[in-house]
Image (spheres, helix red, strand yellow):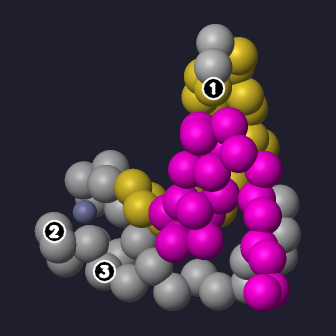
Amino acid sequence: MADYGKRDYGRCPCSGQYEQRFVEVRMTVNGKVVVLTDVPQGACPNCGSRVYKAEVLERIESLMKGEKVKRSTA
Ligand SMILES: [Zn+2]
């Protein structure tokens, strides 16, 4: 995936601090299993809460819709 330099996941509501790690995300898109590796994720070591960055979520959502990412510059 692209270069995600930022690690500012902020704080979890439980007062823990999210830590960046890289995980594997599996999902099923139109009956096909899609595996994303090295997906940056913020994980709270206290309560196990997980967050993704907006651009990562966007990417995942676009994959789930079965769309290729199109960014027209019209
Ligand atoms: Zn937490």
Which of the numbered marks, if any, corresponds to residue 14? 2
Query: What range is drawn magenta here?
Result: 52-74
Q: In this figure, which residue is indicated by the disc labeled 1?
A: 29
For ligand 1, the image quadrant comes to bottom left
The type of residue carrying mark 3 is: Arg
Q: Is residue 29 above or below residue 13?
A: above
Which residue is more in the foreground, 71 or 34?
71
Q: Which element carries disc 2, helix, strand or loop?
A: loop
Q: CA distance from mark 2 to mark 1?
A: 33 Å
The type of residue carrying mark 1 is: Val
Query: Can you give x and y, in whole percent of width and height, for residue 23 in the image?
Result: 65, 46
Instruction: Kindly indicate the quadrant of the structure image that contains residue 22.
Output: bottom right
The type of residue carrying mark 2 is: Cys
Query: Can you give x and y, in whole percent of width and height, for residue 42 in the image?
Result: 49, 65
Whether pointer 1 and pointer 3 mark residues with C-beta atoms closer than 8 Å, the reply is no
- Classify 10 Å Cα crowding around label 2: few (below 14), some (14-19), many (20 and above): few
Q: Is residue 67 above or below residue 69?
A: above
| Quadrant that contains the N terminus | bottom right
Query: Ligand 1 near label 2 (Cβ, under 8 Å)?
Result: yes
- Classify 10 Å Cα crowding around label 3: few (below 14), some (14-19), many (20 and above): few
Instruction: Kindly indicate the quadrant of the structure image that contains residue 36.
Output: top right
Which of the numbered marks, if any, corresponds to residue 11? 3
Which of the numbered marks, if any, corresponds to residue 70? none
Q: Is residue 7 above or below residue 69?
A: below
